[in-house]
Image (spheres, rainbow, N blue to C red):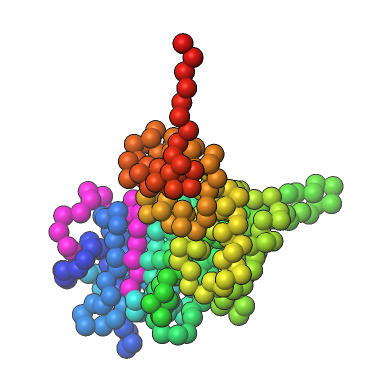
Amino acid sequence: METISGVSNWRLVIRREAAGITILHAVTCDKRAALPEELFGLPVIGLGPRALGVGRAAPVGEEVLVTCGPGGEEWSNAELRELTLPASLRRVGDYAFLNCAKLTTLRLTDGIAFWGGSCFMNCRLLNTFEITRVGQEQGESLAYIADELSCELDVTLHLAEGETARLIFPEYIELFEENVPNHNFNYTICGAGYPYHQCFKNKKLALIDYDLLWPRFLSVEHDEKTAVRMACLRLRYPAGLTDACAEGYRKYLADHAELSLGQMLEARDGRGVAFLLREIRPGREALAAACERARSLGAAEALAVLLEEQHKHFGGAKRKTFDL
């Protein structure tokens, strides 16, 4: 087994090809890891079927140990939380991340031309994706991810123009209920998120199509906390956002000012609080509730911003009176 240095610890089985390296098997002892961009001067272009699958025995092939120093005690992708894929990657095999049950975050470049079947099977915690686009041409990775996973997705898109979009794809649930007398199954989709997971044309996403789903989303039963997150993130990272669509997001946040400020405070996001105060003008009661919440959380910086806003528009907090 050859040993080389890298940014993460990996035990690999590889196959050398004319165009680059395909990783047939990869296991790490790190909870946060990045697969190597190249090996032996060749770019890493592929992940084989079940390449990172948990519990799979290593296949026969060229073995490589990539090391960056001490890692975890156990070599098992069962403990892997965050993974960065190489920018050179072009294909991902079937069931590539099978049973990576603790994986939550995947970072990749939007140049993967082929995704195999059921790549994320049993990755039940995977919901955060950071996708970097290279060049003007949009790849199909996001369409594959949104179709493969029905849970709520938090997606950050780094666009070639230097802009960033942050999108929430709400959850939906597919139900199969057996109709015993007829010996068949009834298929039902529950949740307001299904249209978002399917808002792709020829496997490409236009941000305007995402934004135009907003009124439809609000017209059906939905989770208000999710809606607040969607509106906040779309306004804070407004790549491709039209003025008309932005106004719809602002109106929702203004109508749910107390909840919006409360979520920012819970997340200890002082900049988010300041951002909201610039985007909307909360009423007296919403500001007072936010101040009380900031005090209870010990969020001194956010409290100072809220008190300044309160004083600016309402002349300060209402004085308390006491009966003796």
Who's the residue at 35% across and 58% down the image? 82
Horizontal and vertical percent position of residue 75: 27, 54
Compare residues 135 and 11 and report the one nearer the observer: 135
Residue 178 visible in this rendered orientation of the protein:
yes
Compare residues 97 and 221 and report the one nearer the observer: 221
Q: Quadrant of the N terminus?
A: bottom left
Compare residues 312 and 113 and report the one nearer the observer: 312
Position of 186 compared to 145: left or right?
A: right
Who's the residue at 23% across and 63% down the image? 8
Position of 23 compared to 185: left or right?
A: left
Quarter of the figure with residue 294: top left
Which residue is most to the right?
181
Horizontal and vertical percent position of residue 69: 15, 59
Who's the residue at 60% across and 68% down the image? 245
Q: Is residue 237 above or below residue 17?
A: above
Residue 217 lies in the magenta stretch: no
Please give the range of residues in magenta: 65-86
Residue 67 lies in the magenta stretch: yes
